[in-house]
Image: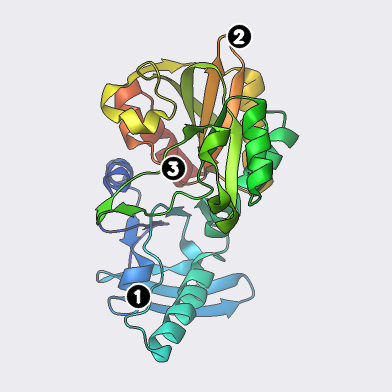
Amino acid sequence: MVDGRPVLVCTEYEDATADVVITELNRRRVPVLRLDPGKDFPDSVTLAARLGPDGWGGTLTAGGRTVELGNVRALYHRRPSPYAPDDDGQAARFAAQENRRGLGGVLGALPGCLYLSHPQAIARAEYKPAQLATATAVGLTVPRTLITSDPAQAKTFTAEQPTVYKPLHAAAYFVDGEPAGIWAAPVEPGELDDAVSRCAHLFQAQVPKVADVRAVAVGEEVFCARITAPPGVVDWRAAYRNLAYEPIGCPEVIRAAVLRFLAHFGLSFGAFDFAVAADDVWWFLECNPNGQWGWLEAAAGLPITTAIADLLENGVRT
């Protein structure tokens, strides 16, 4: 049995970002149990959860170590594998859904547990239409946006101002069997045809930016890095090897709006992307509720690991 109040870390096997956080928690002598629920359960993880007057109790065992569910202080929902069936059979599909709602349901309903962040909150916040509407409501500046499957509407919108197309979801995409990213890219009316009618498309007015900002929010803290890409690069993610980073302060009006955004979705973490114009207006582009930050901490010298460890250990930034 693990002594003390443990932190559960749910993530895939190879996750260097989680490794850094776990190392810091180990340094602080905070007990940690790491598992990948979608892959490990039920073969190497055992659940015995019982509902009592104070909520779910019982035990969770992984890697030969056992924790009391009612004693978990925090759950770090990083990048766990999906609950996938072992084969295409009906029984395997049924079991995968039972595992997701059984183990996943218990892990999402632990009493007195801090979530960074709750899986259901992350899932809600991944929808860009909800993100953009919430960003507007909390006072952030958002570019004109059209989501449509109508080619005529798309042509009209793109003729009104310089426009970029961006995917609604960053799903895996392959070209000739090789993984590829779909980045935000300029689009002209003449490039659009009836293929627009095959699915929803997001078009957005292109911000005349001079730089980008990645703002990483952890609890009440917001850490910002100014990102400068080579001239002509619209989406900085397409030019990782040629970026310059600078840590900068977060304007209070942006910080307050970011925290209202997190509160709306019930998040404890968010990786926000802004385009900064020449007049220093920060234009909200998107929020990844479970975004990567490890490379940014090293590149810009931001104390994100410390902030996350503080939150997981104490529930607050100390």
- Type of amino acid at the residue the image marks with label 3: Gly
Q: Are marks 2 and 1 in contact (CB under 8 Å)?
A: no
Q: Which mark is residue 41?
A: 1
Q: Which mark is residue 291?
A: 3
Asked if residue 212 lies left or right of residue 262, the reply is left
The answer to whether residue 223 shows anywhere in this view is: yes
The quarter holding residue 91 reads: bottom left
* For residue 32, above or below residue 277: below
Q: Are marks 1 and 3 in contact (CB under 8 Å)?
A: no
Q: Secondary structure at mark 3?
A: loop
Q: Which mark is residue 279?
A: 2
The quarter holding residue 257 reads: top right
As measured in the structure, the alpha-carbon distance from the residue carrying label 2 to the one carrying label 3 is 28 Å
Q: Which quarter of the rendered picture does the N terminus lie within? A: bottom left
Q: Residue at x 57, y 26 (%)?
A: 206
Q: Residue at x 55, y 72 (%)?
A: 56
* For residue 57, above or below residue 207: below
Mark 2 vs 3, N-terminal side: 2
Q: Residue furthest top?
A: 279
Mark 1 vs 3, N-terminal side: 1
